[in-house]
Amino acid sequence: MRRAAIAALAVFTLASYARADSGAYLGESARAVSLADAIVARPGDTSAIYFNPAGIADLERPTLSLYGHLGNRQVRFARSGELGASSRRVISGYGVSLVARLPGPEWLERVRIGGSVHLPGTNVIRVIAPVRSDVPIEPYYGGRTDRTAVTVALGVELPYGLRLGASLSVTANLVAPTSVGFDASRGEDVDDGVIIAQDRDLTLTPSFVLGARWQAIPELAFGLVWRQGGATRASGTFDIRAGSIEVLDEYRFYDLLAPEEVALGVCVTPIPALSLSLDLTWGRWSDYRTIHEELPDPLFSDVVDVRAGAEWRAHESLRVRLGYGFLPSPVPEQVASHNFVDSHRHELALGLGLDLEPLAEVPVTIDLALRFHAQHRQRATKDPARLGDATPDTLGQTIDNLGYPGFRSRGSVAQVALAVTVRLDGAPSAPSEDDVSEETSEEDAGETDEETSDEDASELPQVEGDAP
């Protein structure tokens, strides 16, 4: 009873904030979106700060990216024998990221530093605690669609095509001590006498990402990354004092937003105009905890996501991209008291990238992407033996679980993403070492020919006298 009261109060007093997340879902660049996030082994852009920070070592010029996304999340939930209802939610967010090389000697210029900030379109932090533990909850999307992330990254370019990188993200947690009192002299209505006071403070929890990328040969690259994951916590004290009524309790809400992950990627360039990438990402969903930091019943399973992307260079200024992902659900069949809404999903993505520099000598790239998640239909049948008795003081078993005797659900996410990338030096990319070598060879050859001609001319025998 006490927990229900605390949760109910938390819904009203904390809902004006937004979850914080150290992950990048719905906060990545439009290029990453269009490739279904299959970019661990690809040469990096600024969004590599999270996906694989080793990729930022590929950026030769100081680069600034501005990005935003807008989407719609739709879920349909229905108990067995009922029509059910659909819910829709608009998803939006925006951010900025910057990567630059360190100035100084040649060995120091091999180091890149980067930073990014992503904010949801509405609030900075939001914590919603359901009053009942059997309320339908989406563990996969949850806080990923309401994410605040501040990240710094370091990438190092090493010999033999090897790049290493690390990044640090901070996740905001909310501490909100709450006190409730009553003053009968306030107002004419009883409700006017209720006094609620709440302090709000933010604490930051770090999470790390370590990555490597190896460009073995120009046509083949590998990537490996470990992501620590992150969670949001809301905690505080709950103090009620009204006449002879005194209640002092503590509350703590937990929301796993991104599990620990290990991703392995490969990128192949069979022809100069086409590159293909494949990522396998293992997620430790078996560590999932409920809002009250309790183990779910039954336990979640670890999963491996499969993502693939293709990029075709249609023109020196135009890139066409496609992506696909199969994302298995970590949620087992819901036979007990919890009602987690989730199922296997297919991710389809496409996008375009337009580089204005070859066309108009403007160092700007514009990327546009569309992404759609289609979920399988989820079906659940409850086991009465694993459900609690709502009225233990009466004969028989009374079940009031919101998912009993079973339920079905289905959902989808549609998203559009836009990114504008600016190379801040305003100059074309520096020529490659091979180009420089060829130019140097040609210049040396030209100078040698000229010198030889002059020398040869000076060594020719001189004929005295007038020319005929």
Image (cartoon, grey):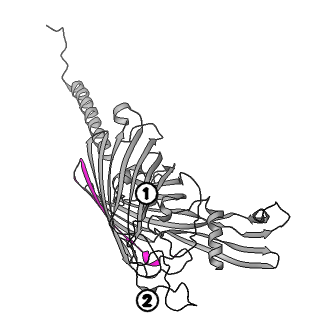
Alpha carbons under labels 2 and 1: distance apart? 34 Å
Count of numbered marks: 2
| Extreme residue toward the left, this view | 468
Q: Please name whichever residue, 254 or 245, is drawn nearer the observer in this view of the structure.
A: 245
Q: Which amino acid is tagged 2? A: Ala
**Is residue 379 within the magenta segment?**
no
Give the residue drawn at x 47%, y 47%.
Answer: 67
Where in the figure is residue 303, as x and y percent of width and height? Answer: 36, 73
How packed mark 2 is, by other alpha carbons closer than 10 Å (few <14, some 14-19, many 20 or more), is: few
Give the residue drawn at x 61%, y 61%.
Answer: 15
Residue 141's mark? none
Seen in the image, is 179 located left or right of residue 23? Answer: right
Q: Please name whichever residue, 309 or 94, is drawn nearer the observer in this view of the structure.
A: 94
Give the residue drawn at x 32%, y 39%.
Answer: 317
Residue 293 appearing in the image: yes
Q: What span is colored magenta in the figure?
A: 266-292
Q: Secondary structure at mark 2?
A: helix
Where in the figure is residue 411, as x and y percent of width and height? Answer: 38, 62
**Is residue 273 within the magenta segment?**
yes
Q: Which amino acid is tagged 1? A: Arg
How packed mark 1 is, by other alpha carbons closer than 10 Å (few <14, some 14-19, many 20 or more), is: some
Question: Considering only order in the chain, which callout, 1 or 2, is on the residue closer to the N terminus?
Answer: 1
Where in the figure is residue 82, as x and y percent of width and height? Answer: 40, 69
Where in the figure is residue 47, as x and y percent of width and height? Answer: 44, 54
Question: Which quadrant of the figure has residue 316?
Answer: top left
| Extreme residue toward the right, this view | 185
Q: Secondary structure at mark 1?
A: strand
Q: Please name whichever residue, 27 or 334, is drawn nearer the observer in this view of the structure.
A: 334
Residue that numbered label 1 is attached to? 73
Asked whether the beta carbons under mark 2 and mark 1 sit within 8 Å of each other, the answer is no
Residue that numbered label 2 is attached to? 385
